[in-house]
Image: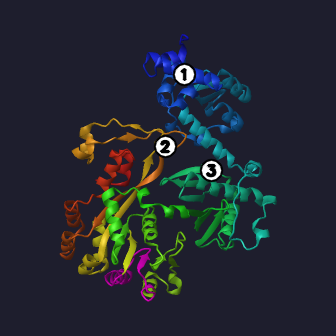
Amino acid sequence: MAVLTGIPKRLVDKSLLSAEQVQILLTQATEHKQGFIATAANSGLIRGDALAKIASEEFGLPLLDLDAFDFDNIPKELVSAELIEKHQIIPLVARGSRLFVAQSDPTRIQSIDEFKFSTGMNIESVIVDHTKLAGAVTKLLAANDTSMDDLDSELDDVDLEDPNAEDKEQSNQNTGDDAPIVRFVNKMLLDAIKMGSSDIHFEPYEKRYRVRYRTDGILHEVAKPPVSLTGKIAARLKVMSQMDISERRIPQDGRIKMRISKTKAIDFRVNTLPTLFGEKIVLRILDPSSAQLGIDMLGYEPAQKELYMHALSKPQGMILVTGPTGSGKTVSLYTGLNILNEEGTNISTAEDPAEINLEGINQVNVNPKVGLDFAAALRSFLRQDPDVIMVGEIRDLETASIAIKAAQTGHLVLSTLHTNSAPETITRLANMGVPSFNIATSVSLIIAQRLARRLCKNCKKPADIPREALLETGFTEEMLETAEIYQPVGCEMCSHGYKGRVGIYEVVKITDALSRIIMEGGNSIEIADVARKEGFNNLRTSALMKVAQGMTSLEEANRVTTD
């Protein structure tokens, strides 16, 4: 066995790796013609931050946490994207004749020499986590990809088409001045789909323009095209959405259907909003595959799933799904409708608008301008021999009264309300003017929900939180017996330690005890107390259960729920 020196020796001396593990990594690094630090970081045998600390100590260089660094003002114009990608080094700050750069492997002296030659500046290195550096390089290069100068060559492989355009010759004018705009917009849409984003924001300001994706419920900036292109980007999106491109004074709604392959198409719901410096345009990504999720994929606890399935199996009654915008109510409703969608069942929905087309279900877009609101659609449904009715949202007494009458006369009704919890749903209906008796006898199940970011399985690490602190947070002794609590780290496969989302639910069946308290006019606090005694977990408890199962972090549970 060869004598170990440098970083490998320090890793063994500090018991971070065994001598055998280090020898294996050295062999792999030689075979793959890769640096030892990159090989060790990618092996999963040691955390990236620990490896960076060892490198910092070995070479006497400062250590930096990239998560705490603001990348908006880095001097990327000093170094080409090719050089950054080749050497995996990022310029951080330029001070006089000195350029500070972030690197993970200080043994790569040739890389520093190339940076020095390219910039003509003295290079000062700081050591960073290899995994975080790789992610930062990827994001930096992605931002550079959106520069208008190179879009022609960079976006040749984007294969998106616009079936909405009736004049194919006009819609496919990808030559001349508009070609980069067309390619840029297509790239933004395709990249958002690949990242699993739910929304795209095109936002103009006085001195800058930015594009943001909402991924796993959080907005992230992904591109900064020149502000001079504000009008052209807006016009392109409005043409694709079949809007009036000459109208810039009022909001408009539209829709884009983008075919990304022979077998898959994605819909975008588009809205424009006139702002001080141009039209802000937001696209909601409507992926039909999200409506085909099985109920087991949504994150219900076994007892909660059983309650939902039992309510769906009833021939009549009302199921209400509540929560703020973006909490997954639509997916929960569509999942239930898919379970009920059989040849012998007549299902009608009134939506504003219908987000995803469901084969075999009669979907209606409400249009209040012509008198087709939710109440009018409901009245029509009742003359259409329905078995199941879905109302996009109960907003007023008239809609609530008709929906409750339908639930009491042999129909299964599903709908949503914007309330924070299941008990508050009861009081909201009562405040609308619905008699307590009708609420108690028609509503069979209430589901309140949130979406929490799911911890990345690749990089999450155990969280060291004292037991007393966990108990104060709301954990029970029973939950802590089998709890596996983790915290986010961050790697090239996720976003800040999270990847995907999981549902958190409060599922309350209207039992005899709850019916009595409702008819007695109990407030939401009294209803919540009875629900807890009946064994129904509230949102906070459900969130802590997801933390105990290692699905999400305590920080994320605190973000989406309160004590």
Residue 385 is covered by the magenta coloring: yes
Asked whether the beta carbons under mark 2 and mark 1 sit within 8 Å of each other, the answer is no
- 247 vs 200: above or below: below
Q: Check disc 3 and report its element: helix, strand or loop.
A: strand
Query: Residue 263, image x and y in percent?
Result: 64, 62
Q: Check disc 1 and report its element: helix, strand or loop.
A: helix
Asked whether the beta carbons under mark 2 and mark 3 sit within 8 Å of each other, the answer is no
Q: Residues within 10 Å of mark 3 (few under 14, many from 20)?
A: many
Tag 3 residue: 223
Q: Point out the frontmost of discs 2 and 1.
A: 1
Residue 371 located left or right of residue 149: left
* Residue 399 shows up from this direction: yes
Query: Residue 259, image x and y in percent?
Result: 66, 63
Q: Residue at x 54, y 10 (%)?
A: 3
Nearer-the-camera pick, 371 or 5: 5
User: N-terminal of the two: label 2 or label 3?
Assistant: 3
Residue 396 is covered by the magenta coloring: yes
User: N-terminal of the two: label 3 or label 1?
Assistant: 1
Query: Residue 74, image x and y in percent?
Result: 61, 38
Q: Which mark is residue 24?
A: 1
CA gap, disc 3 to disc 1? 41 Å
Question: What segment is highlighted magenta in the picture?
Answer: 381-410
- 67 vs 227: above or below: above
Nearer-the-camera pick, 219 or 317: 317
- Residue occupying the far bottom of the picture: 383
Nearer-the-camera pick, 415 or 170: 415
- Residue occupying the far top of the picture: 3
Q: Residues within 10 Å of mark 1 (few under 14, many from 20)?
A: few
Tag 2 residue: 496
Q: Point out the frontmost of discs 2 and 3.
A: 2
Q: Quadrant of residue 283?
A: bottom right
Q: Amino acid at mark 2?
A: His
